[in-house]
Amino acid sequence: MIMTFIRTVIFVSCICGYLAFKLFSDTKNSNVLVETTKGWVLGKEEKTVNLGKTYVHFAGIPYAKPPVGDLRFAPPVPIDSWEGILDATKEGTVCVQFDVGNEDCLNLNIYVPQRSNSDTKPLSVIFYIHGGFFLFGNGGYVFQAPDYFIEEEIIFITCNYRLGILGFLSTEDDASYGNWGLKDQILALQWVKENIEFFGGDKNSITIMGQSAGSCSVNYLIQSPKAKDLFQKAIMHSGTSLTIWSFVAEPRKIAFMMGNLLGIDATDSKELVQRFREMDASSLSFMSTVINIVLEFIYDPKNGLMFAPTIEPYHEGAVLTERSYESLATGRFNKVPVLMGFVSQEGADIYQSFHKIRPYLFIYDLFQEKLLPNDLNIPESVKKTATDEVWAQLFNGSLGFSTTELRRFITEDQFVRPIVETARLMAQHIDVYFYRFSYLGESMEEDGPGIGNSHGYDLYYLFYYDYYTPNQNATDILTRRRMIRMWKNFATTSNPTLKDKYLNPDQTIWPVYKENGTYFNIGEKLTQRTNLSAYRIHWWNYIYKKYGTRPFSTY
């Protein structure tokens, strides 16, 4: 490898008591070299799309050995040290999903703002976990370009973790304990904790952040003793461990059912897992994902995913051994401040894919009891009574093809109800800053009349997307600047309140969440509110209190 110029400046801080590596390069060179605990890595200088701020992108840094062979359906193993210099100027492979990707995918992307030689204070870090319903997605720049965070002097990190059957197969015994994707995330965080100082980061100011399945992952990491002390704050977008699609209640049953559907005639779990190991990764991923999608609608739309986090039998490497609801309710979780929330109409995108909702409409009309929350644990003796009450309240006794009512139901059932309950439970033990994102930009209105903010729309105001961001108007840009600054404030100070009078002219304070439901509404204006009545939260709580039986896993 030929490098015309590489420079690493080492700053020794006696006050802080540790080595911090300052990164920069001169105008003659676009490469930067850093020594980590595993070896030297070479990153590349880039510029942000907005302000043209220089940063260094270290792409595809491996944090674990390839999970192949006997390491498939096994805990991730830390990467060995490498000889020479690791080229981190190009993004690594993505994890297997459908029929794309590679099992050798456990890598990190690190974005480091360039600073002057005199600026030696370690920077706060955001560690972002991508969404995709535990089936899809990756940590690449295209899907979460962190330019705006970089411009706010935040070190931004993304990671790839195992997905689908490869990431979450569980037989509920030592053949395959499951939660492999979560264990990947924990190992990645351990790597960051051990190495971020070398990139100019503060190992004591790490915020984990995620959206959708990534947000659920964040919530699970908050509850896992294995993740203790690996982060100091958490941000959760549109998902928690109480959402019905974030948890698998009967993973062993699903594992054997999947084996049967794939033609595997196994009599015990070890044989089943070994047969899965012998299959081509892409074929296994593709076929299991297709089966998951088909059965979601044929069997029960609310059953959600077949491969997602689950409770493990207790063993030394277990990351989750307790029902999530009970863990949150009793305060048995890692105590860190949390910023969390949802967009105003999470289920609104059903208008864009009407064909997807027909199975919901048909099944709910045919089997009304499926409208009851999955984890209600309702006695059979009162199930009919509860079903009639829910049916009458939600749909006036007839669902038909009312997409408006179904949209509202999906928004409440699969997102808002569990998210609000998570905030309520956690707020009894820690500071929770709760938001509702209701801003609707002009570009979003093009999706269709009355659709509103759907799942994931808030990300358009946090990351750069070349197919959307260039079309933002002045109000869109103001909303984006507000969100980035609030998220930056939380990551650096644990309080998101905006003090900038231009961004927050009314000087609206973002309060901590209370029993009265205090939350922060992000619309054209920033406002404090205390009422989420539009989502029938109190009514759902009444149903749980009247008919539910603890312990709960989801809500």
Image (spheres, rainbow, N blue to C red):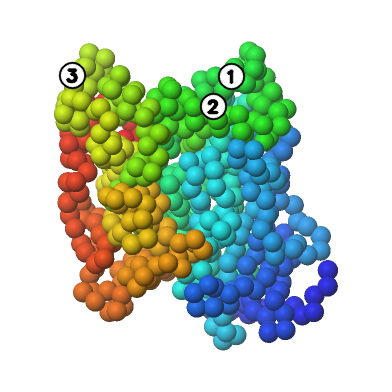
Q: Neighbour class for label 2 at 10 Å: few (<14), some, many (≥20)?
A: some
Looking at this view, is 263 or 318 the one in front?
Answer: 263
Looking at this view, is 126 or 370 the one in front?
Answer: 370
Residue underneath mark 3: 385
Disc 1 and disc 2 in contact, CB within 8 angstroms? yes
Vertical comparison of 44 with 254: above or below:
below
Disc 3 and disc 2 in contact, CB within 8 angstroms? no
Q: Is residue 528 left or right of residue 71?
A: left
Vertical comparison of 170 with 441: above or below:
above
* Res. 200 in view: no
Q: Nearer the viewer, mark 1 or mark 3?
A: 1
Considering the image in quadrants, where does the C terminus appear? top left
Q: For the residue marked with disc 2, what is the amino acid?
A: Ile
**How many labels were placed on the picture?**
3
Q: Is residue 311 left or right of residue 69?
A: left
Q: For the residue marked with disc 3, what is the amino acid?
A: Thr
Secondary structure, mark 1, is: helix
In the rendered image, residue 312, in percent from the top left (x then y), is placed at: 51, 31
Residue underneath mark 1: 261
Vertical comparison of 184 with 40: above or below:
above
Instruction: Point out the residue furthest to the bottom here.
Output: 118
Q: For the residue marked with disc 1, what is the amino acid?
A: Leu
In the rendered image, residue 512, in percent from the top left (x then y), is placed at: 26, 59
In the rendered image, residue 41, in percent from the top left (x then y), is placed at: 72, 65
Residue underneath mark 2: 291
Q: Quadrant of residue 541?
A: top left
* Res. 461 in view: yes
Vertical comparison of 534 with 152: above or below:
above
Secondary structure, mark 3, is: helix
Indicate which disc, 3 or 2, sits on the residue closer to the N terminus. 2
